[in-house]
Image (cartoon, rainbow, N blue to C red):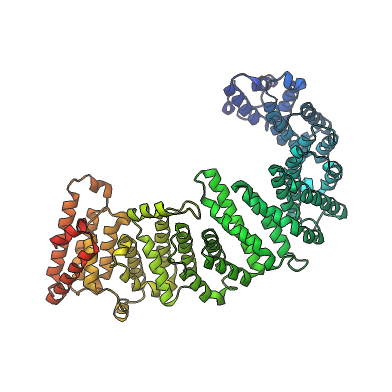
Amino acid sequence: MASPSSLGSSIPAPEAVQVLVSSLADESPMVREASMASLKEISPLNPLLVLDCCSTVSRGGRRRFGNMAGVFQVMAFGVRALDKKDIDASYIAKLAKIATSEIISSKELNADWQRAAASLLVAIGLHLPDLMMEEIFLHLSGTSSALPAMIQILADFASADALQFTPRLKGVLSRVLPILGNVRDVNRPIFANAFKCWCQAVWQYNIDFPSNSLIDGDVMSFLNSAFELLLRVWAASRDLKVRVSSVEALGQMVGLITRTQLKTALPRLIPTILELYKKGQDIALIATYSLYNLLNVSLLSETGPPLLEFEELTVILSTLLPVICMNNDSKEHSNFSVGLKTYNEVHRCFLTVGSIYPEDLFSFLLNKCRLKEEPLTFGALCVLKHLLPRSSEAWHNKRPLLLDAVKSLLDEQSLGIRKALSELIVVMASHCYLVGPTAELFVEYLVRHCALSEHDRIDLESSQVKVGGSVCPTELRAICEKGLLLLTITIPEMEHVLWPFLLKMIIPQAYTGAVAMVCRCIAELCRHRSSYNNNIFDDCKDCSNVPNPEELFARLVVLLHNPLAREQQATQILTVLCYLAPLFPRNINLFWQDEIPKMKAYISDLEDLKLDPSYQETWDDMIINFLAESLDVIQDNDWMISLGNAFTKQYALYMPDDEHSALLHRY
């Protein structure tokens, strides 16, 4: 068999194409796949030849040819490849007859060959939509067993070519509505899906041709009738599939029916949608798509005031808040994707409400935070984080209220709430909400969670109820580290909050695990501020409770002990010592500029360092020598006495069996 690459651009012989088509029914899957690939490559070169060969083998139908699905796929590909000049309506009509005759010959639904035949009819519709639809209309009777398949083809065509389908919507609805009341439950999801696709096609058409609406009185009347049937009968079905597909269709129809009908439908439609949130993650996504469309049409219409008062929206918003927690409930990629889409759609719903009722929504969210019911609080924090950048002007005068609400949650134990709170703090900082003493409180909150250790992880994970998905302490720590760094590097307004406040975060025992990130942030601040302010260290003298240089030096030198500590702690400490050198006696600066790069070079490649069994002993000796030579250079007895006292205080920060205590003994 000729490989696709060997075909090149030469015109294939009819005999060769016939062999390839016959090979579609070969017993070997490999042969079938190779034949399919070759025929798809040949089709653009000579689509009529491929179609002739396929129509020849299709005359006997499924009973005589073992892979009609493959034949129909190739035919669909060939039809799509036809140039307008090659299209013969009578010839294309014969191909359509071949497809429909196969479909109506069986009561099967959604079989491979049937889907392939449908794809052929859709391909024909792309060239000759009226021809294809007339062929479909022949089988749109209530007694036809192929009726569901024909409806699905019309739905597929609407999705494939909205611009050609929409002008023909009236003809479709005029034929479908008379049989709609007799559709059985088993087929209702297919019809509901079709209405969804048809309405989506109308939306797409209106976007592309906003001044050329095709929704006349007849189409509006048809849609209103279908909407009432789906809402009052199908959406109330005991069959969950029928209810879900009906809600999905109604969500697309709400913008196409009359405003009066929509207002009348809201008391029934809203509870119908909200009821689906009890049925699982996949269904919640469908419900949220429909709910967003409903809110958008009801609140943002250009033809009148909002159809819903805020008090009527609270039941919707209270239902949506816990849904936000679903976005991480599963670690499976597919479910995670569904959860993330749902999460984003929920935020779009809140954004729509907030654009009309900003102050009411703000008060609603703060009240949910104050309730301290975990799913509601987590959801409210996530929504605040999402809306704050978009509603900063409307909420400008609400800053004190938001700060108080966030402050009241700083002692919450739920990891999910801590995560949401940490992310909100960063967003608040980026919009200049963090000022004064409260700002330092929030920065300390981030530092506290940057310090989470392995021991904390075990304790926290054993005591947690999962809220906001499976948040783990390691994830929370990473979020806070990233957030603290963002505050330092990207928000100039935070500099006066962080400096010299971060120096206070180096000493406390509880924040030992955060020292690497704190040092990195201090180094970034010093680097940036020194570019325009030569007196940055004067702030330290004016600020109360900032550790003196001897205390900082003692703490940092002890923490140098472990060169393998996470976040390159030793390197970050050495870097920050260089930047803080002006805090120390003047003559130390030149020595550190020479010595510290050597120490950083020794621990620069950690994997290489681990190969040396005596690396820890060597490193400890380097630290001792660094300390001794620094003291030799300083030559200030009072300062050295003060440093000795600072080292003495270090013992309280470590357990007796801690390796840092052993290093302290050597000092």
The image quarter containing residue 560 is: bottom left
Q: Is residue 342 left or right of residue 374?
A: right
Q: Nearer the viewer, residue 142 or 68?
A: 142
Q: Quadrant of the C terminus?
A: bottom left
Toward the viewer: 280 or 250?
Answer: 280
Rendered view: 478 above or below 50: below
180 in relation to 228, above or below: above
In front of the other: 18 or 621 = 621
Query: Residue 577 in the image: x percent, y percent?
Result: 25, 66
- Quarter-of-image position of residue 133: top right
Does residue 386 appear to the left or right of 556 in the view shown?
right
Quadrant in the picture for residue 26: top right
Q: Residue at x 27, y 70 (%)?
A: 580
**In the displayed structure image, the side of residue 311 where residue 558 appears, left or right:** left
Residue at x-position 39% and y-position 75%: 496
Residue 5, above or below 627: above
Where is residue 78? Give x, y as percent: 71, 32
